[in-house]
Amino acid sequence: MSERLELNNETGEKKENAAPSVESITLQKTEKPEKTASFEQRPQRPQNSRSSDSKPQGRSQSSARAIAPMKGGKAAIIRNFVFIISFIVVIVCVAVILHDMSTSRRNDELYNGIRAMVALEGEVSLSDGIVEETGEIIPDILDDYIAVFNENNDTVGWVSIPGTKIDYPVLQYRHYKDDGSVTGSNFYYLDKNFYHQDSKHGAIYAEWRYPIGVTRPNNTVLYGHNMGDGSMFAAVTHYYPFYTGWSGSIDFYQRHPLVYFDTLYERGVYKVFAVMYVHVEEDKYDDVYNYFRKREFPDRDSFNDFIVNIMDRSAFYTDVDLEYGDEILTLSTCYYAPLGTGVDARIAVFARRVREGESADVNVDAAIVNQSPLYFDIYYRSIGGSWAGRTWDISKVSGLTEEMLRQAEAEGRITPDPLQMG
């Protein structure tokens, strides 16, 4: 509307300032104008003062007035200001959503292309340059992964959970220097994708200090982001019941009891046996359980302590048995519910490798909910409650006895069971 007034005022002003003609001057001197003459001679507000090449305004202006009326006092000004800010916020939000959708689509396309490499048929020659760069003798790589390794020689394996989006190469940023020493980083692939490009999705990666090759650590820990679009390790959180409810957690486990983790040299199937919610802020709290630091188990006690600490914290119990010498696979991702981003917390899923000659079948119907997992102090202070004690079947761990538990508690290697105290 303001544009019309300015245009009309400009047009009227031109008419008012125009020089009077001779005929009009003569008329004013010789004839007494009638009452109606003054109205006829008064400059008329043009009905349509825009030129033929000017932009149409009527409909657009009426729409603009309907959305953000400009008339009114201070309240209207405030209302219009709030509207403008809200409109800007909406535009920014839409732009962010579209950007995220585009980023997610590109990430999906990238990994679909890598998965297509796994499906390649025929022989693929291993690059001599890559063999030389690794600084070590490369044994025969599984045919499925040679092409992937050629694309990025940080590739050490492939992890997948059928029926979920987890189906990715596993990377390890570990390199040999000219002097034969090894260097690496656990942060490189936090924000780099498979092709070393900046990406908020990052990649699935392993701790660089423990090489994954022909041999592996006793506990292989893989890291991946919990992405809002459901990619990377987001599905790992579905084993935990905060969003799905306790029964929902069991249902997800029953549909996905196995994790497949192949190295470049051999295939592996792992049975899920636990999931836990923990925080990792060592500098703020003293009750952190560093599952990600437990990589090697030099003796039975160290293995048993690890399993007891995991099972005490697990949200469910399964029928999977464990014994010293089992190879453990841990999938770890960030998780900010239910305490929010103020607490740096993780969801970790634990699985043990199917032993040689053992069936990969799992009796998923035997899985039960742990109604009182062992949490941490900040959780209990925020949510309430306390640990009800150890309720899982310790006979599932070969050789573990109550006497061993008492000794481990006395030495501070595991949390004392409140059911056995006092």
Image (cartoon, rainbow, N blue to C red):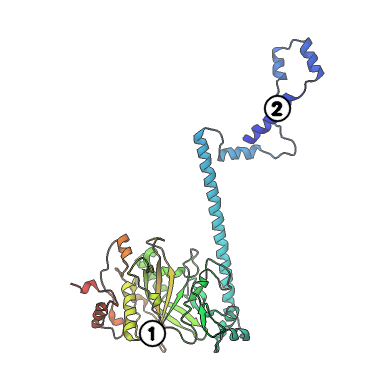
Residue at the location (46% across, 81% down)?
210
Q: Which residue is mark 1?
A: 326
Question: Can the viewer see residue 119?
Answer: no
Query: On screen, 306 above or below 1?
Result: below
In x, y percent, where is residue 169? 53, 76
Cα distance in 3D space between marks 2 and 1: 93 Å
| Left or right of residue 260: residue 15 | right
Query: On screen, 150 above or below 2?
Result: below
Along the line of sight, the residue nearer the viewer: 241 or 416: 416
For the residue marked with disc 2, what is the amino acid?
Glu
| Left or right of residue 17: residue 214 | left
Task: Give the secondary structure at mark 2.
Answer: helix
Quarter-of-image position of residue 346: bottom left
Q: Which residue is mark 2?
A: 13
Residue at the location (24% across, 73% down)?
417
In this rendering, the count of numbered labels is 2
For the residue marked with disc 1, what is the amino acid?
Asp
Residue at the location (56% across, 73% down)?
194
Residue at the location (64% across, 32% down)?
5
Along the line of sight, the residue nearer the viewer: 106 or 208: 208
Image quadrant containing the N terminus: top right
Image quadrant containing the C terminus: bottom left
